[in-house]
Image (spheres, helix red, strand yellow):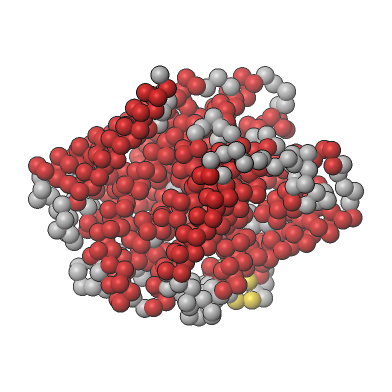
Amino acid sequence: MKLAPVDYVILVLYFAFVLGIGWRLRKGISSSGDFLTSGRSVPIWITSLAFIAANLGAVELIGMAASGAKYGIMTAHFYWLGAIPAMLFMGIFMMPFYYGSKARSVPEYLKMRFDEKTRAFNAFSFAIMTILASGISMYALGLLLQLVLGWSFTISVLASAAIVLAYTFLGGLTSAIYNEVLQFLLIVMGFAPLAILAVAKAGGWQGMVSRLPPNMVHAWRYMGSPTENPMGVELFGMIAGLGFVLSFGYWCTNFLVVQRAMAADSMSAARRTPLVGTLPKMILPFIVIMPGIAALVLSKMNLGYAFPLKATGGPDYDQALTTLMAQFYPAGMLGVGLTGLMASFMSGMAGNVTAFNTVFTYDIYQSYIRPGAPDRHYLTVGRVTTVVGVLLSIGAAYLATRYNNLMDLLQLVFGVVNAPLFATFLLGMFWKRATAHGAFAGLSIGTAAALFTLSSTVAEGKGGWIAHLYTFPSQMAQNFWIAIVAFTTCLVISMVVSMVTSPRPDKEMEGLVYGLTKLPSDDAAKWYQRPAPLTVLVVVLLLILNIWFR
Amino acid sequence: MDLRVPSGWFFTILGLILLGMGVFAPETRAALTTVNVNLYSGACMLVFGLFLLLLAWRATRSHT
């Protein structure tokens, strides 16, 4: 792929705007709260778009198109079965406790509801995870730019990291959030034409259906047995594993996204943030998954389009998006598409960095290293942590170039570590009898159960390091079942240990748990500002999409 | 800062660049399509950018 001068102009124009937004917002920062939590002042339409943009990193963008080519329309389950119900649950049921508790982070909520050890467990595992996640996405981007454009890995990694650092350092979370919205708009405007062109060329949806095996174009019909569908997953594993544990665990407890909703300017806006976010989220599969499916069709149509081959043989689906861009975008629009790719990388990385600096400053530094200092001190620590976070991510990216398999493995392990957390939150928010010891025992044993399941089962040649008790039909199925095991273990152990340890007095838990919290009333608001009508609308649309692509 | 202002300007400028490409270099095409991609995408982006600016302008007017 060759870029024209106009493409570079567009890329530079975008960087100028991103940095300009950071520069303008620097004046609003006078406390650690302004820098790390936006001082709870961001308008709802911005938090809603940032809520989904922070999750739309380069790895997700490239990965979703690749999954579209590999698994077909079933990939949409990550959205229409997984993310959206979880976002609804988060907005309606969990946000009142997060926002109402005045916690500044997810680990801090755990500290208020349970105790110090559960917070420490969550804060440390989250901090390590965010750094690795942003390092891996940096690695993926650098590799792709090297492969497609011949750019130097070092220069593209360092330059994009420097830009992210500049605007997050200047304007903190507000700057990250504002830029995420611009990035999201650019991703949609930059990739929607590609989706339209590629699908049209592939003969429209009907043409794609006629050219692909039926199990690639039906999301539900072939779910009865793992051997019939391309993902190798059966109905229960899909619904309980992906639709419930993994999605609810991610969207309801991952501080990266929760932080965006917490930055909203009122309780009502915080609750509506994930709800409003579901509407654009629902459309995303058409922009990020459809091009992948269309690419598969095009590769079978003798048009001269083919997937590049991997070094190990077999088609490299990760290049679906970039090869389509090269085939459909002329100079000009090509620059926009490439800028969109860079934008997705930046929104993902800025999301990780801003979540990392908040958790480190409040939950690690202020809690264990130096409590009780004046706020100015924590503002400085927040700023320094931003720089350190970016440097550590760059380190992780280089680690990934050296030990590719190690990173693969870590990603697998961290996916697993997150799984039991949702059980802890579910009990913490909705069962006042749940105790601190119960939560910690459940979380640690649940995590251990997840790691044990991973290392005693095998799928596609992975796992099974200590024993070989079971073989899953696919890695997807293995992931989903590990999540189910971890969640159930955490739930059961937490309940049992809670029953035998002494309960916490009700008075201490006001505002933290269901039954002891005055739930926000929204009777006075207009209908579209109330969660219930919004939820009904989203559920109806979701059912239509699932039935249409059944 | 009203985010609609910088976003609006960004898409307006981007739209003008693409529209310019579509009008003055209409023969710039990619391999698999005969559509003047720059022209249509540029027009959409220009309209979107101006729409954001209009919203932001209306908001400042109602405040004062």
Q: Is residue A515 above or below residue A100?
A: below
From where the camera sits, is residue A188 visible? yes
Q: Residue at x 46, y 39 (%)?
A: A45
Q: Residue at x 69, y 61 (%)?
A: A487
The location of residue A98, given as percent across then percent down, is 66, 41
How many discs appear?
Answer: 0
Identify the image quadrant of the C terminus of chain A: bottom left
Does residue A381 appear in this view? no
- The reply, left or right, for residue A93 in relation to residue B37 is right
User: For residue A343, what is the image quadrant?
Assistant: top left
Left or right of A461: which side holds A375?
right
Viewer-side residue, A84 vs A496: A84
Residue A91 in the image: state x and y as whole percent. Answer: 59, 47
Task: Tell me which residue sits at (9%, 50%) in the image.
Answer: B27
Looking at the picture, tell me which residue is in the foreground, A222 or A395.
A222
**Which of these two is toward me, A440 or A218?**
A218
> Where in the figure is residue A410, as x and y percent of width and height?
57, 55
Q: Residue at x 66, y 70 (%)?
A: A456
Question: Could you tell whether B64 is left or right of A322 in the image?
Answer: right
Image coords of residue A399 (percent x, y)? 49, 48
